[in-house]
Image (tube, grey):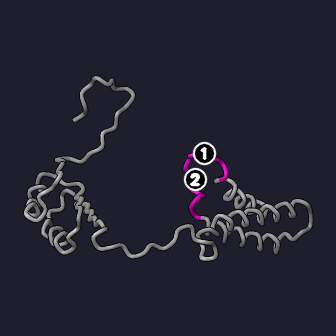
Amino acid sequence: MLASIVASITVLWSVLPLFRHEAWCIRVFDFPRIQVTVITLLVLVAYIAVSGWDDVEDGLFIVALSLCAALQLKRIARYTPFFPRQLKSAAAPAADATLSVLVSNVYTPNREADALIRVIRRHDPDIVLAVETDAWWECALDVLATDDPFALRHPRSRFRLRRETSTRRATSSPRR
């Protein structure tokens, strides 16, 4: 009986992602395919060792577990070295045909602008994106304007999420 319950749960792990539903409790099984495959194979071996092939129910569970393992292996196979590659390796790009981007989430309360400026100057990227900046950060990064005069700035003084509720009317003023 316990073997049948464990086998049923294992089969369910493989079957749930086949349904085209966006609920997280279904989509969560799309990702741990290797783990589900290993567990399925272990449960298959354990089921055969414990229950054997005595009746039709055992045979159905063994077939179901085998099909689930095959399904998982089929989905994993294309990401292994044994499967042909879809893209060819790219040749090294010409130095004048590349674009470098540096993205930094500065975290607004952080006030260590010198460290970021050193990183920017060391790497000399074509584009710098500083995220979660405020007016202080805008002033602190002004020293870069001599090297790169082109800048688009949009600092924010506060970062907070607003939640609109259905009970408020669209014409009401925002919460403070």
Against 157, is 69 above or below?
below
Residue wearing tag 1: 21
Residue wearing tag 2: 27
Residue drawn at x 15%, y 66% as measured from the top left: 112
Amino acid type shown at disc 1: His
Amino acid type shown at disc 2: Arg
Against 109, is 162 above or below?
above
Residue farthest right in this picture: 55
Label 1 – label 2 distance at C-alpha: 8 Å
Please state the horizontal and vertical placement of residue 34, each as a whole percent of the image: 61, 69
Count every numbered label the image shows and give the total: 2
Please state the horizontal and vertical placement of residue 143, each as a whole percent of the image: 8, 63
Snapshot quadrant of residue 144:
bottom left
Please state the horizontal and vertical placement of residue 87, each as a whole percent of the image: 53, 68
The C terminus appears in which quarter of the rendering?
A: top left
Q: Going from the N terminus, do you reach mark 1 or mark 2 first?
A: 1
Residue drawn at x 24%, y 56% as measured from the top left: 131
Tell me if residue 115 is in the magenta stretch: no
Residue drawn at x 39%, y 28% as measured from the top left: 166
Q: Nearer the viewer, residue 175 or 87?
A: 87
Q: Nearer the viewer, residue 154 or 17?
A: 154
Report whether 10 appears left or right of 32. Answer: right
Q: Secondary structure at mark 2?
A: helix
Label 2 near label 1: C-beta < 8 Å?
Answer: yes
